[in-house]
Amino acid sequence: MNAPTGENIKVLIVDDEASIRDLLTRTLRFEEFETHAVSNGTDAVEAVETYQPDIILLDVMLPDMNGFSVTKKIRSQGVTTPVLFLTAKDEPEHKVQGLTVGGDDYVTKPFSLAEIVARIHAILRRTKASKSDDSLLEVGEVTINNDAHEVFVNGNLIDLSPTEYNLLHFMMSNPNQVLKKEQILNHVWEYDFGGNTAIVESYVSYLRRKLDAETTEPVIVTKRGVGYMFRSAKKA
């Protein structure tokens, strides 16, 4: 493939099927990624700490705890490593559930190995891009520190998942502009989930809830039938 190589990028593979673990391991090593594979959620949580991967390929159906629970656990520990879910379920509601617990992307089994590699590169490009912008992005009461990948509201640190962070960064980079749901979907996720904008609605809802708890007035405004706008409210 002509995409950038995965040299020095560490991928944690979590799947209870040995054949899938082996296939992903061989494919990703061929693409020059470093890999480490485990078969259950308990080992995954431990490996996140000891292996410190750059990205996690996480099966949803695991023998001890499901992938959603694994993601919730590592996010509660402050881990922001991107998570790409692997699952046999294709319902939109299932996708929304997975991504709103802190996941970053979603691939349905059976999947194309080329698609897996492409999704990994897309996620890592988003992460790198958000970190390579100017160090500080400040709009009203909200400040993003790109170097530290942290968000502050009136000086208080706000805990966001990587995708919530990317969504906020996109909205704050376009303050006082109405952003269509499809526009947000294509920018933050780089593909359209088959046109399903429910994922945008869910993520905006979660992000708004976290910000509203700290701001003097709501900063994300819904433009009914169109999309959303980040309002540059004045500091208190």
Image (cartoon, rainbow, N blue to C red):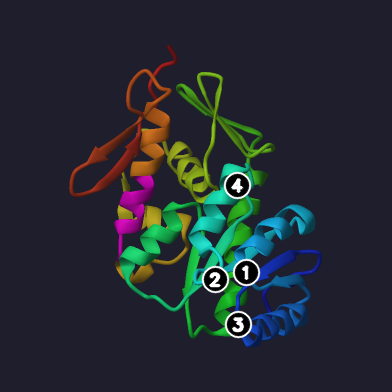
Mark on residue 1?
Answer: none
Q: Is residue 92 above or below residue 215?
A: below
Name the residue at 63% across, 60% down: 124
Q: Earlier in the sequence, mark 2 or mark 4?
A: 2
Percent position of residue 64, x then y: 56, 66
- Label 1 residue SS: loop
Q: CA distance from mark 4 to mark 1?
A: 31 Å
Question: Label 2: how many residues lie within 10 Å, few (<14), some (14-19) or many (20+)?
Answer: some
Q: Which residue is mark 4?
A: 130
Q: 38 or 124, which is in the foreground?
A: 38
Q: CA distance from mark 3 to mark 2?
A: 9 Å
Name the residue at 42% across, 33% down: 210
Q: Which residue is mark 1?
A: 40
Per the picture, the main secondary structure of the magenta-coloured stretch is helix
Q: Amino acid at mark 4?
A: Ser
Question: Label 1: how many residues lie within 10 Å, few (<14), some (14-19) or many (20+)?
Answer: many
Q: Amino acid at mark 2?
A: Leu
- Label 2 residue SS: loop
Quarter where residue 219 is shown:
top left
Question: Label 3: how many residues lie within 10 Å, few (<14), some (14-19) or many (20+)?
Answer: few
Q: Amino acid at mark 1?
A: Asn
Q: Which residue is mark 2?
A: 62
